[in-house]
Amino acid sequence: MPEGTSKRRSRPKRARRTVLVLRAGTGATNNLIRSLKAGDRSLVVVGCHHDVFSLRKSTADRNYLVCRPDERGFASSLRRVVAKARVDLVIPNTDEDVKTISRLRHELPCHVFLPADRVIDLCQDKYSLTCRLASRGVPVPATVPVESLATVEEAFEKLALHSIVWCRIRKGAGSVAATPVRTSEHARGWIRYWQEMRGVPHDAFTLSEYLPGRDYACQSLWMDGSLVLIKTTERLSYFGGGHTPSGVSSVGGVHKTVREPRVAEVSAAAVRAVDPDASGAFSVDLKENTDGEPCVTEINVGRMLSGTPIFDLAGKHNMALTHVRLALGERVDIADPYDATEGYYMARDLDTPAEIFRGVDVFEGIEDARG
C-alpha cells in the first residue's frame, strides 16, 4: 500500500457511517460538521477535545473529552473513543493534529486519510515548500531565509527589487508572526520582538517578495495521484485583519467563489510537485504578484480550511463529504474535477455561523437608509 493512502481496517458493513472530528467546539470544526451534515444527514459525527469548555460548544452528535495531543495518554484515549463510538474515519482539523494523527495512523482501528509523513513535514515548513515548488517551476514569491539578525541586511539586498518585503515564520497558521516591512531595521525589530517575547528563534523567519494582488484559497482532493475535486475562492476581507500589524490574515472574513483556471492550474501543479502520488486534502493559498501571476504561499495539507463551508455549500459537489467518501473507499465519479462556480459569498464573524449567499441576494432583508 502506498505510504500516504488511507489505512483501511476491515469491519462489517453497516448503513450509517461514523466520523470523528478533532478540536470539537471550535469554529473550524463546527463549520466542518455543518458541511458534513448538509451533505449527508445520516452521517454520525463524533467530536473530541481536550478542553471541556470547547466541547460545550460542539455541534457533534456525541462528544468525548480526551487527553491533550502532547500528553502520553492521548493515543489511548483516542483509541477508546474510536472503539466505543465505532468510528470509521478520524478527521484532523489543525496542522498539529494532522501531524499527530499521521504519527498514530497505524495504531488507530479506523481509516486515516492523510498524505505521507514526508509530505506533511514538507508542506508544514513554508521555506522548504517554497524551495521545492521553485525547483519544479511552480510560481512562488522570491524568498530568503534569515540565518541571523546580522544577515538581515544581506537578505534585504537579495530582495532589492521589492520596496516592501514580507517577514514571516516558516511554520504556523493564521499568518502568525507575519508582517510587511520596508527596511532591514523594521525586520530586525520584528524578529527580535518575537524572539524575546515569544521565544521564536531568529532562524525560524524568512523574508520574501511582497505580493500585492488578489488573494486566493484553493481547496482540492486527491486519490493516488489523481485530482478528484478542486474549487477556487478569493478572500475579499480578513477576519481580525484590522487588529494585526499586517492588516491581513489567512482567515477570510468575506470569501467569494471565483472561476480562475490559472489559480486551479497552479494549485494542482503545486500539489503534484510535493507528492506525485497525492492522496487526501490539499488546500493551497495563493496571492498575485505585480504581474498578476498567482504565486503559492503555502499548502495546508491533510485537512480542510476553517472556511470550508464555501467549498461545500456552493457548487455541484460537497467537498467535505467527498473527502469522507474517498477516505472510506466509496466510489466517487466526478467528470470535471474543477467545480467552478461564481457569484456566491461567505461572510464570517465571531460567535456567528458562516453564512453562504448569492451576490444577487446580498441586500435581501436589508433596507437602505443611507438617503
Image (spheres, rainbow, N blue to C red):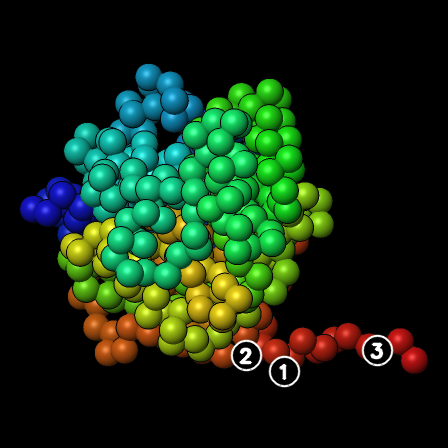
In primary-sequence order, the first of circles 3 and 2 is 2
User: Farthest residue toward the right?
Assistant: 371
Q: Which badge, 1 or 2, is on the more N-terminal residue?
A: 2
Measured as percent of width and height from the top left, residue 8 is found at 14, 45
Point out which mark residue 368 bears.
3
SS at mark 3 in the image: loop
Q: Position of residue 362 (x, y in %)?
A: 67, 76
What is the C-alpha distance between the residues marked 1 and 2?
Answer: 8 Å
Count residues near mark 3 (Cα–Cα under 10 Å), then give few for <14, some for 14-19, many for 20+: few
Q: Decide if residue 43 is on the left or right side of residue 156.
A: left
- Which residue is outermost to the top? 72
Q: CA distance from mark 3 to mark 2?
A: 22 Å
Work out whether residue 38 or residue 214 is closer to the camera in this orientation and state it.
Answer: 214
Residue at numbered disc 2: 343
Cβ–Cβ below 8 Å for labels 1 and 2?
Answer: yes
Residue depicted at x 48% and y 27%: 148
Where residue 153 sits, quadrant-wise, is top right
The residue indicated by pointer 1 is 360
Relative horizontal placement of residue 282, taking residue 12 as reference (left or right) = right
- Give residue 289's position: percent from left, percent from top: 50, 64
Q: Residue at x 32, y 60 (%)?
A: 138
Q: Residues within 10 Å of mark 1 (few under 14, many from 20)?
A: few
Q: Is residue 20 visible?
A: no
> As shown in the figure, which amino acid type bears the numbered disc 3?
Asp
Residue type at mark 1 is Val
User: What is the CA distance from the residue labelled 1 to the residue labelled 3?
Assistant: 15 Å
Residue beneath the point at 7% across and 46% down: 1
Nearer mark to the viewer, of 3 and 2? 2
Of the residues under marks 1 and 3, which one precedes in the sequence? 1
Secondary structure of residue under mark 2: loop
Task: Give the SS element for disc 1.
Answer: helix
